[in-house]
Amino acid sequence: MANVAFIGLGNMGGPMATNLIDAGHSVTVFDLSQAALDQLQEAGASVAATAAEAAREVDYVISMLPAGKHVAGVYMGAEGLLAQLDSSTTILDCSTIDAATARQVGEAAAELGLGFMDSPVSGGVAAAAGGTLAFMCGGAAATFEKAKLILVDMGVNIFHAGPAGAGQVAKGCNNMLLAVHMIGTCEALEMGARNGLDPKVLSEIMLASSGRNWSLEVYNPYPGVMESAPASNDYKPGFMVDLMLKDLGLAMEIAEQSDVDNPMGRLARELYSQHQEAGNGRMDFSSILQKLQG
Ligand code: NAD
């Protein structure tokens, strides 16, 4: 069993850290929120007063923070963790952040001889609690081998996407495609419904045909078609429009920096942005159907 420092105990980090405790690891936590620390202490974690204190003499440092600036703040600079860790520590940043910051932190860690992986996840709060997350990792192959040993206690599918930053690029590609096929699925279902088709029957037809996709298969956006989907529960998230827009913003940055033309991704971001501005930021992202319905 390993000694682990876990930094960032929000909606995702809290249950992920709890799964590590339940798997028998010795976990020391740090967060800016006292309430989050209290909750993890109750679950069996040791609480540290700073990130540096949490990371003292551990095998792994794992972070789950809101954005690139928080990750850079925790790891970089004279006070940052990179300057204080020794080379036996493996660092896994599971936050969803811009690929440029992930590369920058990964390269700075490599210069100091530290193993760092950007390891963003697919799957929301339910997957974090259930230990069924997918991890997309960017970093050296040897670091990936060490990362797998602990990531298996928080997830089921663990991929090595490539070098530093590749995990964030994979996540950006996936979520841009998710936005595009969710909107396409909504358009098709609405067109069918307006022409007298039962959305449930149309869904069955498309699932058995070439329109089959994840939104249709496990997350049907039409109310009443799939009991377990947010659409059948007043579009309660699930995966919020606000978070989809964050991920689409990161995907657009990747596209711009690599000079890729992505008109479908850009249009998806525009539509989700309008949907957010209409006050739907905290709704599930499949509620984009309601925008198309006018
Ligand atoms: P959250 O806002 O619930 O939690 C973030 C936590 O980080 C908070 O507890 C905050 O106090 C803490 N924090 C911020 N700065 C800190 C610092 N300097 N030191 C220590 N703690 C600090 O966010 P979340 O929903 O848990 O998401 C975390 C990350 O996971 C984000 O990058 C998000 O995009 C990604 N993600 C979220 C979901 C989801 O469904 N919520 C799904 C996949 C990925």
Image: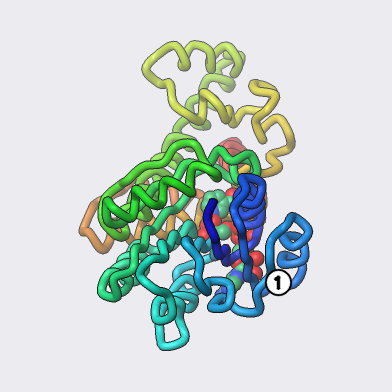
Write the residue at 65% across / 60% down.
10
Between residues 112 and 120, which one lies in front from this camera angle? 112
Quadrant occupied by the C terminus: top right
Query: Does any portion of residue 33 appear in the rendered image?
Result: yes
Q: Position of residue 17 (x, y in %)?
A: 62, 55
Name the residue that disc number 1 marks: 33
Q: Position of residue 31 (x, y in %)?
A: 64, 70
Q: Check the image and name the residue furthest to the front.
A: 1
The crowding category of the residue bearing disc 1, from other C-alpha atoms within 10 Å (few below 14, some 14 to 19, many at least 20), is few
Q: Is residue 170 left or right of residue 93?
A: left
Quadrant containing ligand 1: bottom right
Q: Is 225 above or below relative to 92? A: above
Going by the numbered disc 1, the residue's amino acid type is: Ser
Where, by quadrant of the figure, is residue 131 drawn? top right
Write the residue at 29% across / 53% down.
142
Where, by quadrant of the figure, is residue 32 drawn? bottom right
Write the residue at 44% across / 11% down.
208
Write the residue at 33% across / 71% down.
109
Q: Is residue 70 left or right of residue 238?
A: left
Q: Is 72 above or below relative to 207? A: below
Q: Check the image and name the residue furthest to the bottom.
A: 78
Q: Is label 1 within 8 A of ligand 1 (CB to nearest ligand atom)?
A: yes
Query: Does any portion of residue 277 appear in the rendered image?
Result: no
Q: Is residue 178 left or right of residue 167?
A: right
Between residues 45 and 35, which one lies in front from this camera angle? 45
Q: Position of residue 239 (x, y in %)?
A: 59, 45
Q: Position of residue 96 (x, y in %)?
A: 47, 58
Where, by quadrant of the figure, is residue 281 drawn? bottom right
**How many numbered marks are there?**
1
Between residues 188 and 101, which one lies in front from this camera angle? 101
Q: Is residue 218 left or right of residue 255?
A: right
Q: Is 96 above or below relative to 211? A: below
